[in-house]
Image: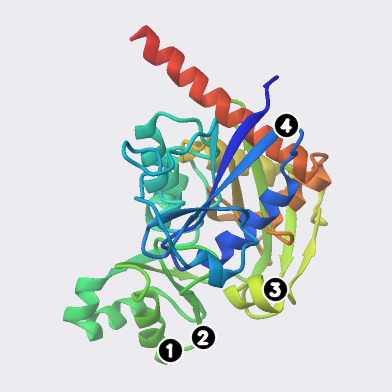
Amino acid sequence: MPAKKTIALLFGGRSAEHEVSILSAAAVFDQLDRSRYDVVCLYIARDGRWKQVVSPRTPLSRLRRGPFRPFLPWQAGAVHPLRADLYFPVLHGPYGEDGTIQGLLEMADVPYVGPGVLASAAGMDKDVMKQLFQARGLLVSPWIVVREPEWRMDRAAVLRRVRASFKPPYFVKPANLGSSVGISKVRRHSEAAAALSLALRYDRKVLVERGITGREIECAVLGNDEPTASLPGEVFPANDFYDYRDKYIDGKTRFGIPANLPPDVAAKVRRQAVTAFQACGAEGLSRVDFFLEKGSCDLYVNEINTLPGFTAISMYPKLWGVTGIPYAKLLDRLIRLGFERHRLKKRRTAKS
């Protein structure tokens, strides 16, 4: 990339992870090398409208005031048509990490950072994700799915099915959300109804899955056709699990970066992280989370995050930092990967 490029940061969005997205975008904005990139910042309001701003660090009160533009910033008739060489979605959760914004960028035929439509959608839906992992021989925690209509029609039957499937503790979580929003740890069956009601506030499909006692291990993946995995890291939650409040408010959780693991276990984590990445058809980046079960030492894949957090305390950039790629260089790599994928796609299109 010999010429200076214009990078459009997309942040905010319609999901419950709106504020997290702003924090991530601010960190990316600070770390982008201004000798190589001009940066355009696009804030997406909770209602889906778009607005160009100077920085993600613009005070919230000013971010939320108009004027806003149509939600297709490049469409004909826009007051100030957007011009960018590559789009960097720093959006978490639905309408950002689930394939919707990726589909929009594909329709616009522009380069962008991160996985495409299929991987983003599969990685957002924890039920589909687990099925893909199982198909590749990866170990996942047993789970059942509860859908909103069955909960609305017969709560007692759903609760009987949950009790028959799992012994406490188990987890209840929205199928399509991240940052631990809407997740509950159920310690006794009497807590299940409240946990299901909470999760169904965020999604029409909910997972109930067996709790695993053990170590929480995370691994970052980077690449397109030949992805590589970082050194693993470990999360030491301050609470029963690494919840939203501790991730972004209290900050009491500790991390082991890199994780203190035997070499063979660390190598297995890295191999399985790449397998999980490829199972979903991911490109660019992802973070894969594991549980290393106490006693059995079985390695369970918990989930893949196709647009992981980029805040100052986020694991994805920290894991690559200890693996030898500092934050600014990591952004360079991600941008290069976005251009590379778009170039190869255009080449295939030209041949057809």
Residue 270, image x, y percentages: 68, 42
- Foreground tag (4 vs 2): 4
Which residue extends farthest left? 153
Amino acid, disc 2: Arg
Q: Return the mark for residue 191.
A: 1
Q: Are marks 4 and 1 in contact (CB under 8 Å)?
A: no
Amino acid, disc 1: Glu
CA–CA distance between discs 3 and 1? 21 Å
Q: Are marks 3 and 2 in contact (CB under 8 Å)?
A: no
Q: Residues within 10 Å of mark 3 (few under 14, many from 20)?
A: some
CA–CA distance between discs 3 and 2? 17 Å
Circle 4 residue: 36
Circle 3 residue: 237
Residue ID at (53%, 51%): 304
Relative placement, left or right, of 279 versus 164 is: right
CA–CA distance between discs 1 and 2? 7 Å
Q: Residues within 10 Å of mark 2 (few under 14, many from 20)?
A: some
Q: Secondary structure at mark 2?
A: loop
Q: Are marks 1 and 2 in contact (CB under 8 Å)?
A: yes
Circle 2 residue: 187
Amino acid, disc 3: Pro
Q: Is residue 125 visible?
A: no
